[in-house]
Image: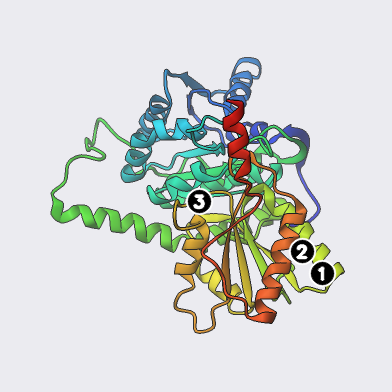
Amino acid sequence: MSITENRNQTIKVVTANEAVALAVKSARVDVVGAYPITPQTSIIEYLSKYVELEKVPMEIIKVESEYSAMAVAMGAASVGSRAFTATSSQGLLYMTEMVYWVAGSRFPIVMAIVSRAMGSPWILGNEHTDILLPREWGWMVLFPENNQEVFDTIIQAYKLADSTLIPVIVGLDGFILSHTTTPINIPDQSIIDSFIPKNTPKPYALDINNPFTHGNAVHSNIYLEFRYDIFRTIEEAEDLVDKIDKEWYKLTGRSYGGTVDEYLMDDAEVAILVMGASSGDAKQAALKVREKYNIKAGVIRLRSIRPFPVKRLKNISEKIKAIGVFDRNMSPGLGGMIATELKFALYDLTQRPIIQSYIGGLGGKDIKISDFENIFIELNEMVKNKIPTTKVKWIGLDLSLIESYMEEV
C-alpha cells in the first residue's frame, strides 16, 4: 500500500464493520436492505444508529430474510437509488437467487460479505468460501486487507459498479477484521462526492414515462449474448480497477495496487499469493526468511478476485520461480479455488513458475507467521532441488482431532 500525507481527512478508531458502515454513509447510500447474521450484524446496527442519532437521510428497510434484503436492494437500484446490503455465510446462500437476479439485471449494488465458514457443521469462524462463491455469479469481488482499506474499497466499489453496471462485493475477514479496532482516515465528504457523484445519468432506472423491464424472458437465441456481455465487461474491468485505485490515490494519498498489491516483489524468486487479513502475516514471514535464510521472498496480495487480474499476474509470474497459493477455502477433491484459477491463468506462459496449492485456516483455525515462513522455505527447496509439487498441501491438518471430538460427543 502506498501512503502520502493525509489531507482533508478525519481520524476515527473503528472496527472494520464500522468502517463499512461509515463508507456506506459517506457514499450517500439511499436504501439498505437489512437482515442480521453473525459476524455482519453490527454493520446494520451502526447504520441504524446514524439514521436515528445523526438523521442521515438513508432508508433502512428491515426484512424477514436475506433473500428479501437483496430484493429490497434490487428494487431500490431499479429506480436509480444507490443501494447496499451485507451478509455472511448461510445468509448469502439464502439470498442466492436474488444475487443472480441482480447480476443479470446489471444493477450497480454494493454488498459487503463478512466471511464466515459454511455449515454443516455449524460454525462461526472465518473462511473465504462465501466471498468466493459469487465470483461465478456475475458480480465483481474485491478483498481488502485492513480496516482502512475496507473503508476505501467500499467507496471504490461504488465507482466501479456505477462505471460498469456490474454489482460489486467487498469481502472482509470475519472477526479478524470485522471486530478488530484500528484507526482509519475518513476524507472530507466533498472529496467522496467528487469521486462518486450521484447525479450521473442512470439509463437502467425504471421510468413510468418510458416503460421497460429488467430480467424478462428472452429467447434462447439471445441468452448467450447477455451472459457474454457480463463476461466481457468483468474481463475488461481489470484495467479499470487499477485506474480507480490511482484516482483515489490522487484524492486521498492512499493506493492499494489496484487489482494486485505487490510486496518485496522487485527481486523475489519465491512468493506467496494470499488474500485478506492473512496478508500481513505473510508479509512479516517474507521479511523474516529474507533475514534468517537469505531467501528472496515476496508476497502477491490478490485484491481483485473478479476481475481476475490475468495480465498483472502473468507479468509478475514471468519474473519468479515459484508461487505458493494460500487458500482459506477449498474446492473439494481438487484444491484451493484461487490456486486452480492461477494455474489456468498462467497455463500459456512459456516459462511458468512452480505453483503449489496450500489450504489452511478453514473455519477460523489459526494461521501463524511461522506457517508462512515454512511455505517460503518449502518453495525455496522446490526450486533448488527440483522437488515436484503435489495437488494440495494442508496446513495444520490433524485428523486425530476428529476422533477425539467424536469420542467426547
Q: How many marks?
A: 3
What is the number of the mark on residue 330? 3
3D distance between C-alphas at marks 1 and 3 = 29 Å
Mark 3 crowd level (few <14, some 14–19, many ≥20, 10 Å Cα): many
Mark 2 crowd level (few <14, some 14–19, many ≥20, 10 Å Cα): many
Q: Position of residue 142 (x, y in %)?
A: 54, 50
Residue sitting nearer the eye, 351 or 310: 351
- The furthest residue to the top: 52
- Which mark's residue is nearer the viewer, 1 or 3? 3
What is the number of the mark on residue 85? none
Badge 2 element: helix
3D distance between C-alphas at marks 3 and 2 = 24 Å
Q: Can residue 39 be seen in the rendering of this structure?
A: no
Badge 1 element: helix
- The furthest residue to the front: 407
Q: Are marks 2 and 1 in contact (CB under 8 Å)?
A: yes
Amino acid at dot 2: Ala
- The residue pinned by badge 2 equals 286
Q: Position of residue 17 (x, y in %)?
A: 64, 33
Q: Residue at x 63, y 73 (%)?
A: 322
- The residue pinned by badge 1 equals 290
Q: Position of residue 45 (x, y in %)?
A: 60, 21
